[in-house]
Amino acid sequence: SSYSPEEIDYRLNNYFKFMFVRHPLDRLFSAWHNRFQEHFPIFQKTFGVQIVKQFRENAPADPKGDDVTLVEFFKYLAATKVSQFNAHWMPFVEGCQPCYVVYNYIGMFEDLENEAKTLIEHLKLSSEVTYPTQQHYYDKNSASEEAKKDEWRKVPPELFQEVMKKYTTDFRLYGYPIPGSIEEYISDWIQ
């Protein structure tokens, strides 16, 4: 950090601190899809190549890392220490340290537009800041609901449960119901 310990303490004690959380499984799917299925070369080279080499049977000698499957991603998550996760898939409890940082506001991604408006109003910034409109290039439904369900169903139940253990605190801390199975998650969360 470029801040001294004193500067960090000052900010933690005097600044308004907020964060937004997201359903852990939605977040994992999004991280996998955005980083390994779409064009994101830095992640594909940094993580994708390693994942394919380590977790794909009969992996090519020189993988590109741009075709990591959800199952391979879950195998990687199961085999990797949480402290070594990238911020895009690290549990919020680890990355944002809510047990150490007293956040003034924690919003839910699932209601982001309303949460952001509430936050902006609370900070008395309504005359200066507006919640941005969705950009034309952002495709919220880049993976169809049926395609999502199909991908989830490929994840073996034991692997699903092993990865779930790493996110249990996020589920509990932020009030998300913990699904007992992939099918329960699919029926409750993917519409």
Image (cartoon, rainbow, N blue to C red):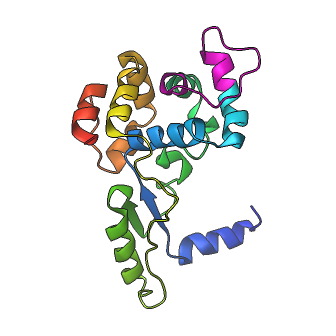
Which residue appears at 71% of the width and 22% of the height?
A: 63
Q: In the image, is residue 162 above or below residue 186?
A: above
> Does residue 181 appear in this view?
no
Asked whether residue 136 is drawn in magenta, I would say: no
Instruction: Pick whichever, 131 or 98, lies toward us.
Output: 131
Q: Is residue 184 left or right of residue 124?
A: left
Asked whether residue 52 is drawn in magenta, I would say: yes
Q: Which residues are magenta?
A: 50-73
Q: In the image, is residue 138 above or below residue 58?
A: below
How far across and down, in percent of the image, does residue 58 sit? 64, 8
How far across and down, in percent of the image, does residue 93 sit? 48, 48
Q: Splitting the image into 4 quarters, where does residue 161 fall?
A: top left
Q: In the image, is residue 59 above or below residue 103?
A: above
Q: Splitting the image into 4 quarters, where does residue 51 fall?
A: top right
Which residue appears at 67% of the width and 33% of the height?
A: 47
The single residue placed furthest to the top in the displayed view is 58
> Does residue 135 appear in this view?
yes
How far across and down, in percent of the image, does residue 177 sit? 26, 41
How far across and down, in percent of the image, does residue 27 sit? 44, 44
